[in-house]
Structure formats: structure tokens, C-alpha cells
Amino acid sequence: MAQASSFYITTPIFYVNDVPHIGHAYTEVAADVVARWHRQAGEDTWMLTGTDEHGQKILRTATANDVTPKEWADKLVAEAWKPLLETVDIANDDFIRTTDERHERNVQKFLQKLYDDGHIYTGEYEGYYCVGCEEYKQESELVPGAGEYEGQLVCAIHSKPVELLHEKNYFFRTSAFAERLLALYEERPDFVQPESARNEVLGWVRSGLSDLSISRSTFDWGVKVPWDESHVVYVWFDALLNYITAAGYGQDDAEFARRWPAQHLVGKDILRFHAVIWPAMLMAAGLEVPRGVFGHGWLLVGGEKMSKSKLTGIAPSDITDTFGSDAFRYYFLRAISFGHDGSFSWEDLSARYQAELANGFGNLASRVIAMVNRYFDGVVPQAGERSAADLEIAAIERRATDASWAAVNRTAIHEAIGAVWELVEALNGYITAEEPWALAKDPANRERLETVLATAYHGLGTLAVLLSPVLPKATAKLWSALGGAGTVQEQRIDLAYDWAVGERVGTLEALFPRIEATE
Ligand code: MSP
């Protein structure tokens, strides 16, 4: 039997210095939707997420809270980061922590190999370091501070002062891979997406790469450098390796061969690490580079990246407690073109919830199920002779299935949802035009009524399958009301238009109930 093709997708691993906000949940949801889509297309899918627990930033937070960094990380993982997955309904296959033994041991293995093969040397570096980014900054990346930091240079992302560090440590010869990286971007134009991200990456590499300092000796919260225990591995070098240590690198060759390479989804703030340094590290180790790196945009507040450190973070549960996890998932992936920045507003969320989810999709589902109950005692009618309008619905089911799957394969998530929404709109238009309630008044129209409701019922089932990665809760309810076999998630999404219809419908509560204004 042919082997199902494998699909491995990752999120960044998140710093545990603070609790998640909706920007973090955004990446989680995007990766989850793409993963669910591939899984439902029959691919051997694996979705990885996790936490980044070493480095100065976590150490300082823990110290300020009078606990050890490990105690701090354990608390945040248990109380904030794992619960986030429940809050926004993530079906991840694995969760890696950089303090896991499986990770630490194999980081050392990887590093030792690079050292033995001559990719690492001792050097000195002096530069401005941003602890928020855990990264040395060029002067061009700094801006004059404001308020309490007036007169100092601050990081453009965190608006906090940078620290001048002078260190003697180990360096990775990133510069040796510039030519191979450029060849990679050339040969695989979709390696870095979207196009704007690719251009940025090309610009960085063409303007020259400097080697990367990969160890620290001024603190010890990290993985020990195997040949020199007075140093710990630089937190980014450690963190990037999670993508392979979680997939069996160093300990399970069969698993690693099955999963790797991965598709990475990351915020554009960390594109350089993923699209330049990470492939260079893999090349040095003789491993395959990632399948691709997609740099998505930021959720903005007042034109700036939403962040906890700027006190602009909104907790995901503030939204899901009122609107539910399905609406959260739908809203952020529908309203923002994936790859661009976007702003969140309660007004926009409420308006889309009402217009698109409650009125557009939810009402359609309720009406069709209710009419099958009312006019046919719940028995699913069979279509008779089909009119052009009926055939058009079938054609749109096919088109929405193909177009959405093609869009997911380009990580154009908003386009995928848009393609499915054509079917929502077409079905609403069809019902308005065909007026089944009017047909029901005259027994002479019985056959036409059967055909109209059979057509609408079929379209609704296709919608349930196509929307299940985005709206897992609502579509599960709808699927059971449709009387479909098995679960909606077992249905092939790439063949959604061809689902096996049920015999009887059940009842359906409102999928997106009215939200009472709280103010
Ligand atoms: N620990 C590193 C990543 C290591 S990956 C090997 C890190 N962590 S982070 O906690 O700061 O989270 C980074 C990711 O969170 C971003 O890349 C992005 O995916 C997401 N976001 C954080 N703030 C965001 C917004 N305001 N908007 C959108 N995504 C945001 O960097």
C-alpha cells in the first residue's frame, strides 16, 4: 500500500516569562487549522508546539519572583501555556519543553557534532543585547527611547533599553553558509513565504552574514556546552533545535525520517532565526532543511505589535468566554490576510460573529435542518430531476473543496475560508430564490421540494466537512444533526463534496447563539 504523505507543522515555542495573549493564540490557531486540514486530507500529520524555557529573560523573571527558573517554567506551563491549547481548541500531537530530557540531551549531541566537524570556534563579541528579544542588535535596529528611557537607545520591538555586552564565547560559522542559503532561496522560491518575507530574507543574506555567538558564560540557566561546562548554549540555538529533538533526532531515526522536514509558522519578528540561521545549522549538521518557513504578521494595538511587556496583551479567554473558541479561530483567520498585520477590535469581532457566523452559516444550518424535520419528518429527501440552480450548487461544492485545499497548500488560510464562504453565500441565495416554504404549501410541488431540500442538505454537509478545521465544535454538532456517518473529522476534506449522505436528521440548537451586550 502506498505510504500516506507526511506533513509536519510547528509553531514557535513560546517564552514562559509571561502568560499568553491573543498574538500567541493566533499562531497556535493558524498552525492548528492547517494541521487539521492536512490530517483530514489523509496525510500522516503531526503538529508540534511547546515552550522555550532557558535564557536570561526567564532567569530574570524567576529571580524577581523568588523562585528557581525551573519552578517558574513548571508553573507557567501548567497554569497558562497548556491551558491555552484548551482555550482555543488546539489538537496538537506533541508539546515540547526545552527543559525536557529528550531535548537537552540531543541539543548537546547536535552541538558536539558541529564542534567536531569544525563549524564552531572561540571568539569575542561586543554588542548591544536586547533581553526581550534574546538577541544582539545592530545599531540600525535601535531607536531613541521615550519617557523613562529618554536619552537611551532602545530595542525597536520592545521599546526597552539594550545592554552593552562583551563576551568571550563560542561562535557558529553561519557566514560559511551564505552561498548555499542563497542557492536554496533561488531553487525553492516558496521556501520563505510570503513574498515580502522572502525579499527581506534575501536582503539580509545578500548584505552579508556574521557568525553567531552560541554560548553564554555569565549565567547558567541553559543546556551545558558538552566540551566546556562553564558555558551554556545560547537560548535561540537551543530553542530552534526543538523542531528536530521533538521529532526523534538523535534517538529515534525511524520517527525522524517519518516526520522531518517540517513546515514552520512563525511571527515575522523571528524570521531571521528561522529562515537564515536555522537552515544554516541544519546544513552544517548534514540534515535536510525545513519544508518551508511562513512568516505571518502581527496583531497590532495602536499600530504597534501587541505585547505583554507593553501592557497591550489581551487574554484569549477574554474573547472565548463570550464568543467561544470557534469564533476566535474563525475571526482571526478570516479577518486578517495571513502574512499581513491586522488590528483587533471588539466591534469588528461582534459584527462578523453576527453577520457571518450567526446569520450566514448558523441560520442556514438551522433552517435547512428544521425544514427537513418539518416537511419530511426528519427523513432526508432524495433529489429528483435537477435544475440549473441545483447543478450550480453541486458545482460550487466542488469548487469550494478544490479551491480551499489549494489555498491551504499555499498557507493562504484566509483565502481557504473565503473559498468555503462562497458556498455559504450560494446556499443562502439558493434557499431565498427557491423558497422551499412556498413549495411546501402545494402538494403538487412535492418533488421539487424534495430536490431543493436534498440539494441544500448536501451543500450543508459539504460545508460541515470544509469548515471542520476552523470551527471544530460547531461542525461536530452540525454533523450529528445531519446524521452523517462517523465524525466530521473522519471525512476526507479534499473530497468534501462527495460525502455519504445520512438517512435522518436530528435537531440542531443554534450554532452561534445571540450574544447579549454586556455594557
Ligand atoms: N521563544 C521564541 C521563539 C523560539 S522558536 C524556536 C519567541 N517566543 S515568544 O513567546 O516571544 O513568541 C513568539 C511568537 O508569538 C511570535 O513569533 C508569533 O508567532 C507570536 N506572537 C507574539 N506576539 C504576537 C503578536 N502581537 N501578533 C502575532 N503574533 C505574535 O519569540
Image (cartoon, rainbow, N blue to C red):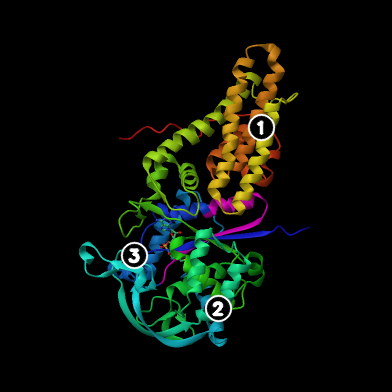
Residue that numbered label 2 is attached to: 177
Q: Mark 2 or mark 3, which has the lower sequence index?
A: 3
Q: Is residue 96 visible?
A: no
Q: Is residue 283 above or below residue 84?
A: below
The residue lying at 32 percent from left, 70 percent from top is 60
Q: Amino acid at mark 2?
A: Phe
Q: Amino acid at mark 3?
A: Ala
Magenta stretch bounds:
31-54
Q: Which disc, if any, is residue 393?
A: 1
Label 1 within 8 A of ligand 1 by Cβ: no
The residue lying at 64 percent from left, 38 percent from top is 462
Q: Secondary structure at mark 3?
A: loop
The residue lying at 33 percent from left, 80 percent from top is 165
**Mark 2, residues whose alpha carbon is within 10 Å: few (<14), some, or many (≥20)?**
some
CA distance separating discs 3 and 1: 51 Å
Residue in the foreground of this view, choosing between 68 and 405: 405
Residue 373's x, y, as percent? 61, 23
Q: Mark 3 or mark 1, which has the lower sequence index?
A: 3
Q: How many marks?
A: 3
The quadrant where ligand 1 appears is bottom left
Residue that numbered label 3 is attached to: 156
